[in-house]
Amino acid sequence: MEYSSSVLAKAVNEFAKLPGVGEKTALRYALWLLKQDKEAVAMFADSLSDLKDKVFHCQRCNNLSDTPLCPICQDTERNTKQICVVETIKDVMAIENTDSYKGVYHVLGGVISPVEGIGVGDIKITQLLSRVKSEAVEEVILALPTTMEGDTTAFYIHKLLENENIKVSALSRGISMGEGVEYADEQTLARSIALRQSFDEIYKH
């Protein structure tokens, strides 16, 4: 597509780098911004800059936060003896939206996937083990995708925790095979958490 303005072309090119955004949608975004007043555009630009400069990973659970510890880890009413292990930050948001879980989280930042070159050292498994050993954890809930990679990761973590004298459970199979936690509807997810079973019981076959 030809543009009469190189500045507009640059903006379209940057918007088109966003996931799921093609050139036509990127152009629509850029033209919309051109219609806004200067203050609104400046606020938009500042918010993008702040995303990179002021949003961090929680030092304890790897969730996103504006402070060293995220609000969930700071909440004294949360059950710190219960850790829900998830793949991504979006999974934390999905579970929180159910309002059915009052423990804390551990965000792995991915799952083991040899095909994609993601190994144990590329995700936060070592940090999880350190938390289990230092925080008097009683239960680890594995809320990972029902995929081959998710199951591989769950099996690895379960094996790692075998000698830690804690309960290791997993979500009931209400979530469809091949589906991630973030895509499950709230009712299904809440039920899967409430009806969670021991890892051995779910995977014994």
Image (tube, grey):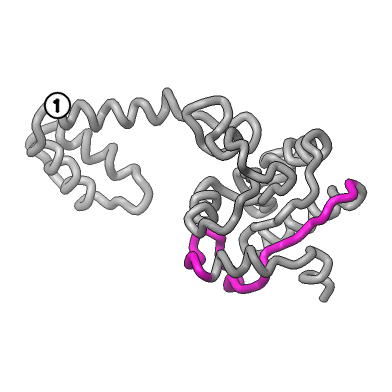
Left or right relative to 76: residue 142: right
Give the farthest residue toward the bottom. Answer: 205
Q: Main secondary structure of the magenta part?
A: loop
Residue in the foreground of this view, choosing between 100 and 114: 100
Relative to residue 156, is residue 80 depicted above or below?
A: above
* Residue 109: quadrant of the picture: top right
Q: Quadrant of the C terminus?
A: bottom right
The kind of residue on which mark 1 rests is: Glu
The residue nearer to you, when weighing 72 against 51, is 72
Would you say residue 196 sits in the magenta stretch?
no
Q: Between 188 and 52, which is closer to the camera in this rendering?
A: 188
Which quadrant would residue 53 be assigned to in this image? top left
Q: Nearer the viewer, residue 72 or 10?
A: 72
- Residue 186 within the segment the image draws in magenta: yes
Q: Which residues are magenta?
A: 164-187
Horizontally, residue 3 falls left or right of residue 179, namely left
For label 1, the SS is helix
Q: Residue at x 70, y 66 (%)?
A: 196
Residue 28, percent across and down?
A: 16, 48
- Are there few (<14), some (14-19), or many (20+) residues within 10 Å of tag 1? few
Kindly identify the residue that appears in the image at 22 percent across and 40 percent down. Answer: 12
- Does the image show residue 57? yes
Q: Is 10 positioned to the left or the right of 202 in the image?
A: left
Q: Which residue sits at x=26%, y=29%?
A: 45
Q: Position of residue 24 (x, y in %)?
A: 20, 52
User: Quick check: 90 above or below 191?
Assistant: above
Quickly name the residue at label 1: 39
